Amino acid sequence: MRAFAYQRAADASAAVQALAASDENLPPTGAAVQVLAGGTTLIDLMKLDVMRPGTIVDINPLAPRWSQINVADGHLQLGALARMSDVASDPALQRGYPLIADSLKLAASAQLRNMATLGGNVLQRTRCSYFRDVSYANCNKRNPGSGCAAIDGFNRAHAVLGTSEQCIAAYPGDFAQALIALDAEVDVVGPSGSRTLPFAQLHRPPGATPQIETTLAPNELISGFAITGRWPRSTCRTAWCGTRASRSADLPPCRGACGKPKPCSAAPASMTRWPSARRMPPWPARSRENTMRSRSHSASAWWRAPCARPQRWRFEHVDCRARAQGQYGRARSPL
């Protein structure tokens, strides 16, 4: 690991000020100053020499204010520094927002969940082997303009949807799928103060600049997440599902989350999500929502259709270079 300077931020303004030393022309992922929370992604990538920050700013002193788990009056507030295991095991959250709890308790290993924070989880980097191995020079995320080795390489676990000619890496997070399904908002702090944006607008598609993964400025921090409305099991039907090659803590190549109040005959607006079918970045399936909202279904027909069994997706004979151009070969799906 390369040498680096270590700082501890006493408050949010100190953390933002420390981040202001970064080059504004660089995306947050390539900045010389990086934030340390749980460290489960950052330290790993520093050991691999993928990320090479000159300064690490520890924001764990902000935990007393940024680690809240508040479920009250039909609203959910989650701090960015709340640990995944704490949120997944919270009784009030399990009753009121089981989709959130399921997406967290089924992610990673127990050791990682005890360390990882919610803010770090949604900002985690791709698991693309070409990105994480610096012996491969061709990686547009790591070396912009160098090409994408995965397109002509081993890409079984790479993205099928939401790619570009510059990158086919898949987004690895599970928690993000649940946030999109429940129309969550993300709170951000920066030099100009605080702002809130829909979580669905946080991540950027790769396009021509896959090294820019979010809409955050280099000196902005995620402080928390908010979900408005009630999603308890008693009045709503929600589901998180994913497929894995084994029962170990590997990453599901396909995952999704969906939710709707019950009972009802048609889908209300923004109630159904199919956020990830091997895609980069996480996404809401708006066209599918519109289709379901425009129809009336019996309860049995409804739950056969929108619970999106990702294990039934089959992609056959997909040429990766054509896939990067939006041509997916023969893609079969029950949807």
Image (spheres, rainbow, N blue to C red):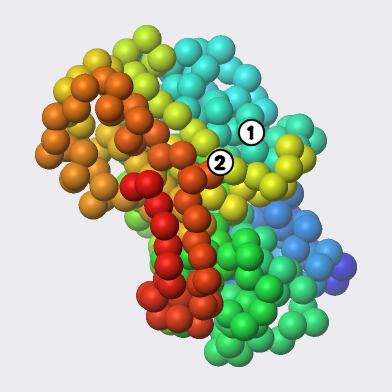
Q: How many marks?
A: 2
Q: Is residue 53 visible?
A: no
Looking at the image, the residue that sits furthest to the bottom is: 146
**Vertical order, 334 against 169 (above or below):** above
Q: Secondary structure at mark 1?
A: loop
Circle nearer the viewer, 1 or 2? 2
What's the residue type where badge 1 is placed?
Leu
x and y, in percent, of residue 198 in the image: 33, 47
For the N terminus, the quadrant is bottom right
**Vertical order, 199 against 322 (above or below):** above
318 horizontally vs 228: left or right:
right
Q: Which residue corresponds to the image point at 53% horizontal and 77% vertical from the top-left?
A: 320
Disc 1 marks which residue? 106
Q: Which residue corresponds to the image point at 44% horizontal and 22% vertical from the top-left?
A: 97
- Label 1 crowding class (10 Å Cα cut-off): few <14, some 14-19, many 20+? some
Mark 1 and mark 2 residues within 8 Å of each other at the beta carbon: yes
322 horizontally vs 4: left or right:
left
Disc 2 marks which residue? 242
**Vertical order, 197 against 67 (above or below):** below
User: To which quarter of the image does residue 272 belong?
Assistant: top left
x and y, in percent, of residue 10 in the image: 64, 43
Q: CA distance from mark 1 to mark 2?
A: 9 Å
**First reached walking from the N terminus: tag 1 or tag 2:** 1
x and y, in percent, of residue 182 in the image: 36, 34
x and y, in percent, of residue 241 in the image: 52, 36
Q: Which residue corresponds to the image point at 20% horizontal and 31% vertical from the top-left?
A: 267
What's the residue type where badge 2 is placed?
Gly
User: To which quarter of the image does residue 304 belong?
Assistant: top left
In the picture, the disc for residue 313 is: none
Q: Which residue corresponds to the image point at 50% horizontal and 29% vertical from the top-left?
A: 100
**Vertical order, 204 against 183 (above or below):** below
Q: Is residue 299 visible?
A: yes
